[in-house]
Image (tube, rainbow, N blue to C red):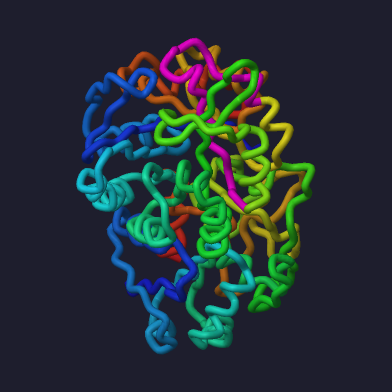
Amino acid sequence: MKIVIIDYGAGNIQSIIFALDRLGYTATLSDDPEVIRSADKVIFPGVGEASSAMKKLGQHGLEEVIPSLTQPVLGICLGMQLMCRYSEEGKTSGLGIFDVDVIRFSDDLKVPQIGWNQIRELKTPLFDQIPENGYIYLVHSYYAPLCEDTIAVTDYGLPYSSAVWKDNFWGVQFHPEKSSALGEQILKNFITL
Amino acid sequence: MLTKRIIPCLDIKNGRTVKGVNFVDLRDAGDPVELAARYAQEGADELVFLDISATEEERRTLADLVHRVAERVNIPFTVGGGISSVEDVSRLLHKGADKISVNSSAVKNPRLIDELVAKFGSQCIVVAIDAKQIDGTWKVHLVGGKVPTELDLFAWAEEVERRGAGEILFTSMNHDGTKNGFANEALAKLSELVNIPIIASGGAGNRDHFLHTFTKGKADAALAASVFHFREMEIVELKQYLREQGIPMRL
């Protein structure tokens, strides 16, 4: 099993490496398109600001590589948001894999949303053995509204997509690597897809 | 539903966990990595590591400790204490910390908050504020609460929000170590004033203190140290109690 974490300078990568270690998997970090293409599973992390992260992806020549991948790809947090069509954060276009625009939470709410919330209406094998309304850890100010690709719903002021799926691409808004045993199960599900 | 968070705080000195009463008379409360793993297993929602080392030499062990904690622990954790530059933050995040808290260094140089937010994003920048109520007004204090300033707590909280901080960790010096409850009046005012999450700190002694800091203090999270370190309170029992009282809790 060759797992590659895309390393483009915009992610809390260490936590993902450690979480995979705890599951007994070793991941490779790379920004090399050939290494990424040859992986069995690809993890696309990301924290920080959307437009600068898109610029970094461009600098590493990865804007076209990621959408062309054919093996299972998991975008985490900002990684998921960048796989969408557009983000209101920094008014940047995304990779366009998921047909949805990422927008900011209402100022009636505390923003960022930080902490543990629940996931429901779970679909696809990514959530095998995961209970409805299980708790996951999130930190974000922008969100993907419900759409055709939604495979998990979370409520914060309104229901939104906490996970999306299309073909070989999965995206999760929450941090599975920081979501205790439940998050580790989701990572394991992705790796054994 | 977004839950309220219970956060054990581990005060670290020279790589060991300590907890003082009113920040003096420190007592040793064990190995930080073991304690962190235990808390994660027992249902803590997050952890905070606060390095209270007095010297650079003692502080050097922090990055290694962060690495060892990140290897073991599958919940988020924040690291604070003596952090004063982009390089400090970069090093600790690369070792596996999820969030960083800045305190005195941000008061001395508020632009540090902007720089950190621009480089790492709001989501990982916590501003810790130690304040003391003197003659009815809350004044920010520095260096672990030892040095008073003329800065008003509420004005400073608004400023750190404006500069992009993702969260505020507010410790009341009047309440810290007393076990008489949190500073709920000030907390409620803070929570209404700013639109970012507030972590309440200082004064936890019993489970109703936690309840009231969520209901009256409108806090998003509550932090405590000694009640957990010395097992005066079990985290899971505390969370069960709070849920029974109608507080959303992850169990």
**Quick check: can you spot residue A181?**
no
Q: Which residue lies furthest to the front in this view?
A: B150
Q: Residue B138's quadrant in the figure?
A: top right
Residue appearing at x 58%, y 79% in the figure: A55
Q: Which of A55 and B168 is in front in this view?
A: B168
> Residues in magenta?
B164-187
Q: Residue at x 56, y 84 (%)?
A: A58
Q: Does the magenta stretch include residue B25?
A: no
Vertical order, B149 against B60 (above or below): above
Quick one: A4 or B114, which is closer to the camera? B114
Residue shown at the point (56%, 63%) measured from the top left = A48
Asked whether B135 or B106 is in front, the reply is: B135
Residue A22, placed above or below residue B21:
below
B183 vs A159, nearest the viewer: B183
* Residue B213 percent across, percent down from the top left: 60, 21
Q: Where residue B95 sits in the image (x, y, percent)?
A: 33, 57
Answer left or right for B46 relative to A26. right
Residue depicted at x 39% and y 19%: B22
Is residue B158 rendered to the left or right of residue A36? Answer: right
Find residue A94 and report its image quarter.
bottom right
Position of residue B202 measured from the top left corner of the image (x, y, whole percent): 48, 22
Task: Give the mark count.
Answer: 0
Residue A159, percent across and down? 74, 48
- Residue A31 visible somewhere in the drawing: yes
Quarter of the picture holding the N terminus of chain A: bottom left
Membership of B165 in magenta stretch: yes
